[in-house]
Amino acid sequence: MTCHLLIPAAGSGKRMGADRNKLLLPLLDKPILQWTLEAAIASKAIAWIGVMGQPHDYPEFQKIFNCLNTRKPIRLIQGGATRQASVFNGLKALPADSDRVLIHDGARCLATSELFDRCDLSLQTIQGFIAAIPVKDTIKVVDGDQIVDTPNRDHLWAAQTPQGFHVDLLKNAHLTAVELGWEVTDDAALLEKVGLAVQIVMGEETNLKVTTPQDLAIAEFILKQRKF
Ligand code: CTP
Ligand code: MG
């Protein structure tokens, strides 16, 4: 059990349009972030969890932590202005002995503990991966309102989290990004930019990122199905 998990949870949830961080909104009987944490706690592979948050959310986060029935250490880490900055802060806060790290968005609250376990297993043989699923739609590349390309769908995958890496590699990639001013939307993109191989681990169809009120309704529907 040496896998560490970082959960970026320091956003504001603008697209949700609520009056607070979307991760604090209720989904069925508990906050979104609690669902994410419970799946991570149920994963045998994860030994330590760091949650990046904004200080004004700490009291609410702490309340959620207090509801969790676990002996796994859960640490609050100050988030940054972007997801990338939040992850960078998380990497700096990892215990010195950590060698493998998973990054999983707090907003992907439907990921299962089996997915975390499979991800950790992959990281024992590869240096970096992302969970992803094949896209079902035909994707168009558009410039203005003109289609310029229709890429072959066989090569298109939709990125999810968890994403996982050997800690040294990801730390170095983040340091390079700070030095060169790179801004990316996920951690795999940093490894790709420094020329390191990142593999795919099969994600989960239901592992959606709760972004809009519609996503919240879909998440509720999926969770209700799981109860039976
Ligand atoms: N996140 C973070 N630090 C930031 C911004 C985002 O840790 N400065 C986290 C979010 O809390 C979320 C994850 O990154 O768990 C994915 O981001 P997203 O779904 O975009 O969440 P928000 O940024 O909160 O939403 P929005 O973009 O609609 O404002
Ligand atoms: Mg965002």
Image (cartoon, rainbow, N blue to C red):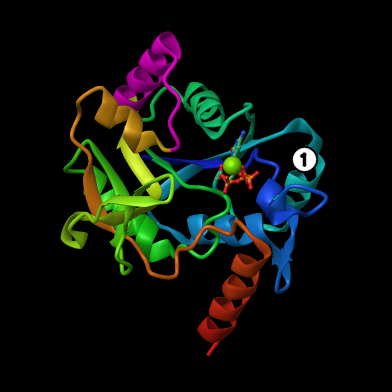
Quadrant housing residue 43: bottom left
- Give the overall secondary structure of the magenta segment: helix
| Foreground pick, 116 / 219 | 219
Along the horizontal axis of the image, is 31 left or right of 210?
right
Distance from mark 1 CB to nearest ligand 1 atom below 8 Å: no
- In the rendered view, would you say 108 is above or below 204? above
Q: Nearer the viewer, residue 4 or 169?
A: 169
Q: Quadrant of ligand 1?
A: top right
Front-most of residues 223 and 195: 195
In the image shown, does 221 or 138 lie closer to the viewer? 138
Q: Position of residue 72 (x, y in %)?
A: 54, 47
Q: Can you name the residue that lies furthest to the bottom here? A: 228
Q: Is residue 165 left or right of residue 93?
A: left
What span is colored magenta in the figure? 168-185
Question: Residue at position x 65%, y 40% from top?
Answer: 11
Quadrant including the N terminus: top left
Q: Which residue, given by chain and number where applicable, does mark 1 sit on?
A: 57
Kindly identify the amino acid type of the residue bearing the numbered disc 1. Asp
Q: Quadrant of residue 190?
A: top left
The residue located at (42%, 9%) in the rendering is 179
Q: Position of residue 10 (x, y in %)?
A: 65, 38
| One can see residue 179 in this view | yes
